[in-house]
């Protein structure tokens, strides 16, 4: 079975992630195939719009092949490094794609799925959309350009999402600025059909906008938006070890739960994620952030918390990770800074 399907209908090029049993989790081969086709379609006058969807009912994409990353980390291999390098370059390509790119973020969207969709020019969520950033509980830090998206979310919502791994619904995704339109899942097929009717000579971008306006409706409200008061107050301008006490003293059950969730994550990755997002706020664009994320990801790959996090969450599923260091207070500033030390392997997305 082909892991990605590529179809041409009218002036539309369809990319369909096709591993429904794995919620369309990305493999290296899928990344390479998508990049190859997108580069060809970018200069093909017969393709004017790209539409990304996922096969099955469960989601667009649940991330990467976690088992493959675990096995590679255990043996100290290079396949994960190569996968991330090519995946991040694909994300950069999508962000600067020269033609309208419509990503349908239906169902579960995490990790690599965010990279493929949240940088697109037109991002659609449905009532079934569920997005999360679970990386700090796996011994990782949000990547695929996520720290850029989180850095540009309103107030401290992005930091809250990254440090807690809270699951976001369509209203939250819209509030964070990671989607543009809300469409009922039953209307997605109609939307794609309408896009296939775009004619040569039309203003393609305007035609795509018209299709989206015709089918989209106001999105649901965001629960996170209503929590902005304590979120902004607790996360703003302090180190991670001070965020938890602030949350516990906020006199809000949701803030208390956020503190509990942070304390379950890798202390090192919580601190590095916080630093990554704050650094991203002052960066000039997505490509520079992707380069930073690549360096951080390689440092995570070499650290003990990645193997332990994947073991506890994915392999043994005991949900009882033993992190090293074990607490936020034990993670020194020097340790955090070491994650941002460049790894000299020649990676630079802005050279493409």
Image (spheres, rainbow, N blue to C red):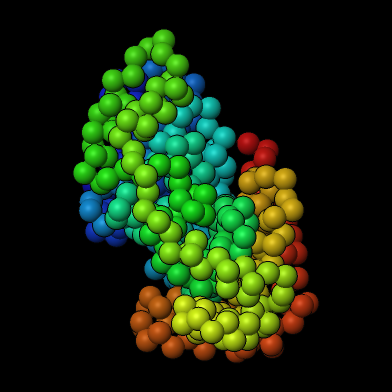
- Report the side of 272 relative to 179 (left or right): right
- Report the side of 243 relative to 91 (left or right): right
Residue 179 percent coordinates (x, y): 45, 46
Frontmost residue, 215 versus 309: 215
Q: Where is 153 relative to 181, above or below?
A: below
Residue 98 percent coordinates (x, y): 53, 27
- Does any portion of residue 17 appear in the rendered image? no
Residue 14 percent coordinates (x, y): 33, 33
- Does any portion of residue 326 appear in the rendered image? yes
- Report the side of 275 relative to 4 (left or right): right
Q: Where is 145 relative to 194, above or below?
A: below
Name the quadrant containing residue 140. bottom right
Q: How many marks?
A: 0
Residue 340 percent coordinates (x, y): 72, 64
Name of the residue lying farthest toward the top: 201
- Assign the C terminus to one quadrant of the image: top right
Frontmost residue, 235 versus 252: 252
The residue sitting at 49% across, 36% down in the picture is: 121
The residue sitting at 37% across, 40% down in the picture is: 52
Frontmost residue, 231 versus 99: 231
Frontmost residue, 103 versus 212: 212
The residue sitting at 40% across, 78% down in the picture is: 313
The residue sitting at 41% across, 10% down in the picture is: 201
- Report the side of 156 relative to 6 (left or right): right
Name the quadrant containing residue 96. top right
């Amino acid at each position: 079975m082909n892991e990605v399907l590529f179809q041409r209908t009218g002036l539309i090029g369809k990319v369909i992630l096709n591993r429904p049993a794995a919620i369309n989790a990305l493999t290296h081969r899928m990344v390479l195939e998508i990049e190859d086709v997108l580069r060809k379609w970018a200069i093909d006058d017969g393709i004017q719009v790209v539409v990304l969807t996922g096969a099955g009912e469960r989601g667009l994409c649940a991330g990467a092949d976690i088992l493959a990353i675990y096995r590679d980390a255990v043996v100290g291999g290079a396949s994960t490094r190569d996968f991330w390098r090519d995946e991040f370059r694909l994300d950069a390509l999508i962000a600067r794609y020269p033609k309208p790119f419509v990503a349908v973020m239906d169902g579960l969207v995490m990790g690599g799925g965010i990279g493929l969709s949240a940088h697109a020019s037109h991002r659609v969520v449905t009532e079934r959309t569920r997005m999360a950033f679970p990386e700090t509980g796996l011994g990782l830090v949000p990547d695929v350009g996520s720290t850029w998206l989180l850095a540009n979310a309103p107030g401290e919502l992005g930091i809250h999402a990254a440090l807690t791994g809270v699951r976001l619904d369509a209203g939250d995704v819209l509030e964070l600025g990671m989607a543009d339109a809300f469409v009922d899942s039953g209307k997605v097929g109609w939307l794609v059909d309408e896009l296939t009717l775009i004619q040569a000579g039309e203003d393609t971008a305007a035609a795509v906008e018209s299709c989206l306006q015709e089918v989209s409706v106001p999105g649901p409200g965001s629960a996170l938006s209503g929590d902005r008061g304590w979120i902004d107050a607790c996360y703003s301008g302090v180190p991670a070890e001070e965020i938890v006490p602030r949350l516990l003293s906020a006199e809000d059950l949701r803030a208390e739960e956020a503190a509990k969730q942070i304390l379950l994550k890798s202390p090192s990755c919580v601190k590095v994620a916080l630093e990554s997002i704050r650094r991203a706020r002052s960066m000039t664009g997505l490509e520079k952030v992707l380069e930073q994320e690549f360096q951080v990801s390689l440092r995570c790959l070499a650290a003990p918390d990645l193997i332990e996090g994947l073991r506890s969450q994915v392999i043994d599923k005991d949900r009882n990770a033993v992190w090293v260091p074990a607490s936020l207070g034990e993670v020194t500033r020097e340790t955090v800074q070491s994650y941002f030390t460049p790894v000299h392997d020649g990676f630079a997305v802005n050279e493409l």
